[in-house]
Image: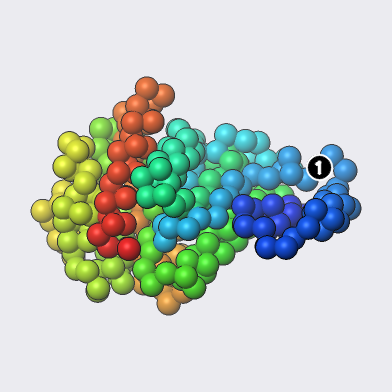
Amino acid sequence: MQFPATPRIARRFLSPLPRPAGARPIRRVLLALWLAALLPAGGALARDLVHAEAGELPVIIAAPHGGRADVPGCEVRTATGKRFVNRPDHNTDRLAQVIAAELKRLTGQAPYLVIARFHRKFIDANRSPEEAYGAEGCAADYDDYHAVLRRNVDDIRAKHPQAMLFDIHGQSAYRDAILRGTRHGETVTRLLARAGAAAVTGPDSVFGRFAAMGYAIVPSNDTALTDRVEAKNYIGGYTVARYGSHRADGIDAMQLEFGRDFRNNDNVERTAQDAAQAIAAFYARYLR
Ligand SMILES: [Zn+2]
């Protein structure tokens, strides 16, 4: 069984793209009528489980694991052998949202933003389709998430010579640290080739800034990426592997794993502000 593609079509027109000059109100009315005709009764937008905002910066902020919403028609995932996790990365949806807002405040331009609103117990957007969900009724929302990411990567590649995707996660194994995941440098292949290791571990790298702010980071910045020192189980998942710059159609991509202490309700805003500062510094030095 396949879900109708209507929500995806609708989102394409509702995403915050600038209205073409000369678009007149009558066209908007016709568009609204056309959309209303497409949407099934009950309103398909209630099923809009991927939050997507187009941007101007060559930066994508993605959060696959912060969602809290049920997925109608999708069964809860059942455990598989491969490090099965069905709990969300608490507050990473909020973290991504505030990072994006702060980046816009700091740079004057918004990053691209993609947040899964569906709960991880239904769909794990940072897994391959084979592992991400257990029933066909979940495919449409998983596909939505990755269609947005693919479109954003393609859009950025057409407009900017260099760019970075930050995949935002949370972990509790290192509760007071931030972890870097680049699959030991693989997903930032192009960044390393043009700017060297300093772009990942130097003073104007994201983790250089985190360290300067006093955050504990794993691995430390005095190790070489080629030492394969990224933390076991946190080297970077499906998203950075699929969209990273080791692929011809990718961009540089890095997984950021925020410790639990930085994501509680008291600290999450501050953490997001600091992360935005770190990303803005990296942008100014390496992406502009
Ligand atoms: Zn995660």
Q: Residue furthest front?
A: 22
The answer to whether one can see residue 20 in this image is: yes
- Percent x, y for residue 117? 58, 41
Between residues 208 and 65, which one lies in front from this camera angle?
Answer: 208
Query: Residue drawn 60% across and 41% down?
Result: 118
Query: Residue drawn 19% across and 38% down?
Result: 213
Q: Is residue 228 left or right of residue 5?
A: left
**In the rendered view, would you say 161 is above or below 126?**
below
- Percent x, y for residue 148? 58, 58
Q: Which residue lies furthest to the bottom in this view?
A: 248
Query: Residue drawn 24% across and 74% down?
Result: 193
- Percent x, y for residue 28? 80, 54
Q: Is residue 154 left or right of residue 138?
A: left
- The residue labelled by disc 1 is 43
Residue 240 in which image quadrant: bottom left
Q: Is residue 29 left or right of residue 288?
A: right
